[in-house]
Amino acid sequence: MNGRMMLVTGGAGFIGSHLTERLLNEGNKVTVLDNFSSGKIENIQHLLDNPLITLVKEDMKKPKQLRKIVSDSDIIFHFAANPEVRLDEIDPKTHFEENILATFNLLETIRKNGTAKTLVFASSSTVYGEARLVPTQENYGPLMPISTYGASKLACEALIASYTYTFNFQARILRPANIVGSRSTHGVILDFIKKISANPERLEILGDGHQEKSYLHVSDCVEAIMHVTEASARDTQKVDVYNVGSNDKITVTQIAKIVSETMGKPDIDYEFTGGVEGGGGWKGDVKIMQLSTDKLQRTGWKPRYSSEQAVRLAARALIRENTRA
């Protein structure tokens, strides 16, 4: 997949910046569209000298340039969203606007454009809620998100599915597990790094410590995105859904141990908050999550790293990025 015109919404964000880098390395022309509400210019600064990249500051809640950008694009990677699940209790409107409204505006632009496009959408494992079946397959149901973030992603999935059938374009929906690695701006690993930096004697751990989830390194995630996109060119199915994750899971206590050891604080005291609603870290926190990736792996993709390996790699990278003198 090279020499194509690509649009990456949220291209200055965590996953979006890594995807943009990969697309450029393969010789594609890439338009990065970002409102920088959560994305950072630093994430793509090293790419801006490349003549193949175009950076557009655009708010998809009130788009002004989107029509022309979509018209010029062959493939649209829609990764623009507010990624912070824990906004649920204090600012659910942000998830509606940054996730649902932005996606609706993109779909309306594709509709008005009138030419066939391929849309690759980053949904989330949170659409499954507290799944009774673990590992959880794509056909699991009913889908009952327990966070407004998960609900917003599920709403986007429904909108995308309806638009692909009604207005004749192709979409691939990805449901990632917890993606970790350099440039991440939120999540348990970064939370632990900041807490240990502030107090190297004690580490507060939200929940009861038994939360257990899958973690996938961002490089494996990008490989999955590329793999699904390339495979979509070889079939005519309107819309399809793929889980993207590792083949195992890891507890939050194990993550705390990895981060504290990597920071040279192996004997730090852990303090568990006890959590809410059965030991989750906060309202909306899915306590146990592991995705079945059998469907994606049958197409030839498989993760290089286990959850533990991904966490170790991410911890080292994020410590370097967030504890510089």
Image (tube, rainbow, N blue to C red):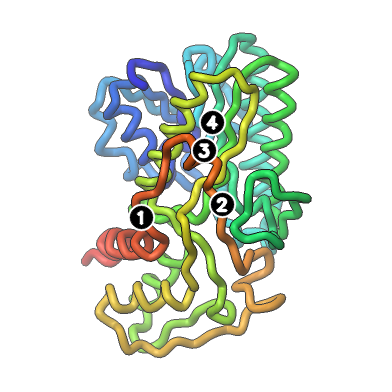
User: Which badge, 2 or 3, comes first in the chain's sequence?
Assistant: 3
Quadrant for the C terminus in the image:
bottom left
Q: Please tell me whether mark 3 sits on a helix, a strand or a loop.
A: loop
Q: Which one is in front in this view, the residue at disc 4 or the one at disc 1?
A: 1
Residue type for callout 1 = Tyr
Depth check, front residue: 234 or 320: 234
Query: Residue sitting at 47 percent across and 26 percent down?
Result: 231
Residue with the mark numbered 3:
79
Residue 263 image point, x, y percent:
28, 75
* Numbered circles on residues, count: 4
Residue with the mark numbered 1:
305
Cα separation, mark 2 vs mark 3, equals: 22 Å
Residue 203 image point, x, y percent:
43, 83
- Position of 117 with respect to 143 (left or right) is left
Depth check, front residue: 48 or 256: 256
User: Which badge, 2 or 4, comes first in the chain's sequence?
Assistant: 4
Residue with the mark numbered 2:
292
Residue type for callout 3 = Phe
Cα separation, mark 4 vs mark 1, equals: 23 Å
Query: Residue sitting at 36 percent across and 41 percent down?
Result: 18
Depth check, front residue: 50 or 15: 15
Neighbourhood count class around disc 4 (C-alpha, 10 Å): few under 14, some 14–19, many 20 upward: many
Cα separation, mark 1 vs mark 2, equals: 15 Å
